[in-house]
Amino acid sequence: MTTVTFDSLNPATGEIVGSHPKHGPDAVRQAVGRAEEAAGWWAALGAGERRRRLLDYKAVITRHLRELAELVHEENGKPVGDATLEIVLAITHLDWAARNAQKVLGRRRVNPGMIGLNLAATLEYLPLGVVGVIGPWNYPVFTPMGSIAYALAAGNAVVFKPSELTPGIGVRLAELFAEAVPEQPVLQTVTGLGETGAALAADPRVRKVAFTGSTATAKRVMAACAENLTPIVAECGGKDAFIVDADADVGKAADACLWGAMSNAGQTCVGVERVYVVDAVYEPFMRELSDRVAKVKAGEDYGPITMPGQLDIIKRHIDDAAKAGKVVAGGTGSVRAPYVEPVIVEDVPEESPAVREETFGPTITVRRTRDAQEALELANASVYGLGGTVFSRNTRRAMELARMMRSGMTAINSVISFAGVPALPFGGMGDSGFGRIHGADGLREFARPKAISRQRFAMPGMNLTSFTRGPAELERLIRLVTFLHGRRKR
Ligand code: NDP
């Protein structure tokens, strides 16, 4: 039987990077079947051995860092340096997940409370079984690894469906895993187009799906998962705001803003897309921004737009913004497929597509605000709620603004810094999705809490869960609960 294949292309040159099978529903079913068996084996290995194996996997990836970075560069288009940075971050997450899984998920005793005085209560987080990971193309190592590493560390087997634009990377991640864990296919990659991901989400033996991509596709994946009541984690991008307060260091703010917006050609779910600058520092901030953006070049500082179809969306947003606002850098001619030069537009109406919809390109809109409060209100008036940034020299005020920002993560006086802290959970709210990867929450996301209460001795005269219970026991219970809870006490 001939295998139907598809090609992954270098977005900068159009050259074929690799050819991969289009795995149909049968192949996906088989992969999930193998994963089910592997999951049992992996869970039975125990936390200590899993930790060792995952640290081995980390070492294998680290030894292949240059090769992987080159492949990311070829399939996604980003510069090799950025690809290296992405893989290094993924390595730190793999390390954290491996080292912390036992501590976060392992069995512990919890306080049984006064009424449960005769009980020993324990809590532990057990593996789910098979986890399906559906990954994107913009950070083809870092993003899926945020789910894969944590799911594996929690004792699950993973079937990974990379984006059709970056399948080679996905295949390589599973091949390298097999070097550290040759016995069983605990991490498998299935390749193909949307149908392959759909088949994975629809398989009832998949106990959880971790999805990264667009909100529209997340809804389709969730609908498929609903058939089997399969839970999902959805990371669907955003429209992140960058707030510059009156006492910010404008040079540092402009530098961070530019990198947060333009690096990876703006194809970053937590990339800067909307900038709100307090009136008092508006002019100096814009001067800094204009000076710096003049030195940033598409094709040198960042790569091409990976997904050709995205160019139309970016162009539509730029054209519309340029018509309604005032262009500071770039403009309608900045889209030169497959590249997009940096674009900065001021005073774009808040209801414009460039302010409301995810652009996923090297473009920002900038607006002057009366004060930080107004900046925050505008920042929060989005259907998305993924990340965000606050620049201010006043730590207390910056913390306040960050806490009030309607998003899952906020960086202060830095940009996207939360993504590099493995202990911090990553995820959003609203149209940005739900659930968390990374950190202790990310480990628990891929595990099920198991609660056990063990009776250590019978409570004399207090057998409440028996038909032999009489009025005297009930009376004792009422007295006890009145003593414990009947007083106004803080
Ligand atoms: P999609 O949401 O369509 O794709 C994301 C992943 O889902 C890919 O692996 C894709 O496979 C897979 N997929 C597609 N259809 C289905 C389906 N019905 N069932 C299961 N899996 C499916 O995103 P795109 O790559 O098309 O990008 C569109 C937009 O999404 C971008 O413009 C950007 O705004 C946003 N995006 C956000 C990302 C983020 O980091 N949050 C990452 C990538 C995109 P395949 O690639 O084979 O179609």
Image (cartoon, rainbow, N blue to C red):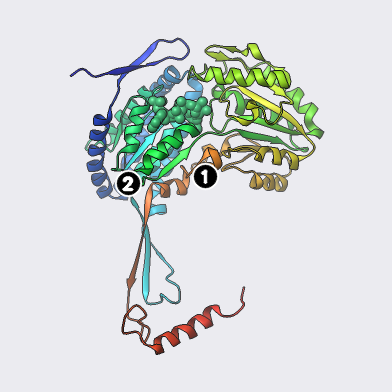
For the residue labelled by badge 1, is the local secondary structure a helix, a strand or a loop?
Answer: loop
Residue at image x 59%, y 17%? 315
Other-residue count near label 2 (Cα within 10 Å), few / some / many at <14 / 14–19 / ≥20: many
Q: Position of residue 327 (x, y in %)?
A: 72, 18
Q: How far is mark 1 from mark 2, CA to CA?
A: 20 Å
Circle 2 SS class: loop
Q: Nearer the viewer, residue 30 or 339?
A: 30
Q: Looking at numbered disc 1 in the image, what kind of residue is underneath it?
A: Leu
According to the picture, the residue beneath numbered tag 2 turns out to be 155
Image quarter for ligand 1 equals: top left
Tell me if residue 138 can be seen: no
Q: Where is residue 47 in the image (x, y as percent from the top left)?
A: 32, 50
Q: Ligand 1 closer than 8 Å to the CB at disc 2?
A: no
Q: In which quarter of the image is the C terminus?
A: bottom right
Most foreground residue, 295 or 203: 203
How far across and how far down the image is residue 402, in percent?
A: 65, 44
Say if 71 sits above or below 16 in the image.
below
Residue 282 lies in quadrant: top right
Q: Give left or right: position of 346 versus 29.
A: right
Badge 1: how crowded within 10 Å, few (<14), some, or many (20+)? Answer: some
Residue 401 appears in which quarter of the rendering? top right
Q: Is residue 439 above or below residue 166?
A: below
Q: Residue 424 carries which label?
A: 1
Q: Residue at x 58, y 20 (%)?
A: 314
Instruction: Please say if 383 is above or below 288.
Output: below
Q: What residue type is labelled 2?
A: Gly
| Image position, residue 87 (x, y; %) | 44, 29
| Mark found first going from the N terminus, 1 or 2 | 2
Snapshot quadrant of residue 108: bottom left
